[in-house]
Amino acid sequence: NAIQQALERDRAARQHSSEIAELRERFDALTSREREVMALVVGGWLNKQIGFELGISEITVKIHRGRVMGKMGAQSLAELVRMTERLELPRVTDQSAKTK
């Protein structure tokens, strides 16, 4: 019984590692601008606020946001937030904070 439990834990750990590696690969495919936009979107910022913060138009923010969703394979903002949590990425929640 103990061996079966150990095998199951190992299988679950390998699956988790594989999923994280796949998410990391998707994240690594993002451009630096897409990563900036993603961090702000996940932090709850509006497109208008992101555009102002980054010095780009709201339409450009929407384009970057769409590319982020596509490259990450996220169907919703909630799913994108869960992905960033699984990757343990920092979240920008203070809307007066400057991004780098």
Image (cartoon, rainbow, N blue to C red):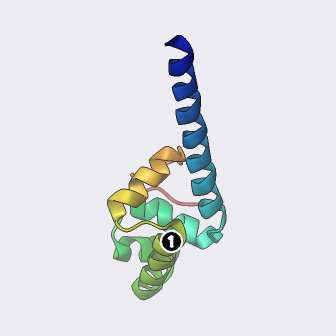
Q: Quadrant of the C terminus?
A: bottom right
SS for tag 1?
A: helix
Q: Position of residue 6 (x, y in %)?
A: 56, 20
Determine if residue 44 is in view: no
Which residue is denoted by mark 1 in the rendering? Answer: 68
For this rendering, which residue is in front, 19 or 95? 19
Q: Is residue 19 above or below residue 62?
A: above
Q: Is residue 13 visible?
A: yes
Q: Amino acid at mark 1?
A: Val
Given residues 44 and 53, the one toward you in this image is 44
9 with respect to 93 (left or right): right
Image height of 44 relative to 82, above or below: below
Which of the pair 21/69 is nearer the observer?
Answer: 21
Residue shown at the point (50%, 82%) measured from the top left: 56
Give the residue at x 59% y 72%: 33
**Percent position (x, y) of residue 15?**
56, 42
**Location of residue 28 (image quadrant):** bottom right
Q: Of 96 and 42, which appears nearest the observer?
A: 42
Residue at figure coordinates x 37%, y 75% from the top left: 47
Say few, some or many: other residues with alpha carbon within 10 Å of mark 1 (under 14 / 14 to 19 / 20 or more): many
**Residue 69 position within the rendered picture, expressed as x and y whole percent measured from the top left:** 46, 71
Q: How many marks?
A: 1
Picture coordinates of residue 36, whole percent (x, y): 54, 65
